[in-house]
Image (spheres, rainbow, N blue to C red):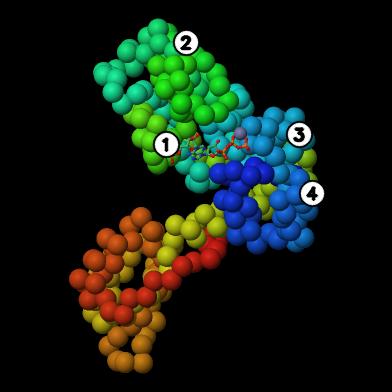
Amino acid sequence: MLRLAIQKSGRLSEDSLNLIRECGISFISSSLKLKTECTNFPLEILFLRDDDIPGYVADGVADIGIVGENVLVEEGKQELTVEKLGFSKCRLSLAVPKSVEYNSIQDLNGKNIATSYPNLLQAYLQEQGVQAHIHTISGSVEIAPSIGLAEAICDIVSSGSTLISNGLKEVERVFKSEAALIATKDLSQEKREILEKLLFRIHAVQRARKAKYILLNAPNDKIEEISDLLPSVKAPTVLPLAEEGWSSLHSVVNEDDFWEIIEKIKDAGAQGILVVPIEKMII
Ligand code: PRT
Ligand code: ZN
């Protein structure tokens, strides 16, 4: 059985559990339980503080884990990364009070900066040739300037609204982060095979999240032009309709290109366009 460590309660928890569920893996989760065994896949889930996950995986207490890259790199454990997972996207940024004039990173020379990420910050300052005093605090970093602890902060930002409501402005982006799947170095052959199976499912889920299945009707003389506009896993499927001279085209389009493609195929003569979500996509 493979042991997966995920955050017990916090910003990573729901998306991590959803990913496992979307892989068709069932388990009973309760806020009181610290671990649970999946019922239809050889996986045990441990629920931990996110900061403890890289250490548990590095030590082999858990075989794999899901954690933010910010925590992983801060703890110097980036070599455990298997792959990025595309959720919990955020950035580690430097911010100063809104009223302070800020021209460049050099303005932070000799200043006090409060952060929960001293290693990431130190590496960035060094790279930029800036010497500042780093004050490591474990939470509520945003209030440091207003209580006189520091002139600047370095903290996680996602929408930016926390900075604004604390009278701060983002001035430098130090690190970009998202959730990552990590694994211990010496997985047994048996566990590696389970991990491969899990990754196969994760990839199918991730592909499906980005893809839409599209069905449309088109006059036969427009099929070629429309087919050229439709990117597809292979060529689009073309099926004759009961009405003579017409066909139905089926294909898969990427969410990012979606609206642009719809406009083009409409202009090229497509009618009755249907777009449906895809649950899993195995290539
Ligand atoms: O209890 P535990 O130690 O497990 O959790 P935690 O409180 O340390 O972490 P948690 O749940 O807050 O965050 C877990 C992970 O989610 C982080 O390590 C990041 O990888 C990721 N993440 C994504 C975020 C955010 N977005 C985020 N916005 N982590 C924290 N924030 C905080 C930030 O610290 C700031 O206070 O949200 C505030 C800013 O948000 P905006 O939207 O106002 O900019
Ligand atoms: Zn934490």
Residue appearing at x 33%, y 12% in the figure: 106
Residue type of the residue flagged with mark 2:
His
Q: Amino acid at mark 1?
A: Thr
In the foreground, 111 or 177:
111
Residue shown at the point (48%, 58%) measured from the top left: 209
Q: Earlier in the sequence, mark 1 or mark 4?
A: 4
Q: Earlier in the sequence, mark 2 or mark 4?
A: 4
Q: Nearer the viewer, residue 211 or 157?
A: 157
The x, y position of residue 167, in whole percent, is 35, 30
User: What residue would you read off at disc 1?
Assistant: 162
Q: Tell me which numbered mark, 3 or 4, is placed earlier along the sequence.
A: 4
Q: Between tags 1 and 4, which lies in front? A: 1
Tell me the tag on residue 133. 2
Q: Is residue 99 above or below residue 156?
A: above
At 37% from the left and 75% from the top, the residue drawn is 274
Q: CA distance from mark 1 to mark 2?
A: 23 Å
Q: Which residue in the structure is indicated by mark 4?
A: 1
Indicate the position of residue 121 as horizontal and vertical percent values: 48, 20
Label 1 within 8 A of ligand 1 by Cβ: yes
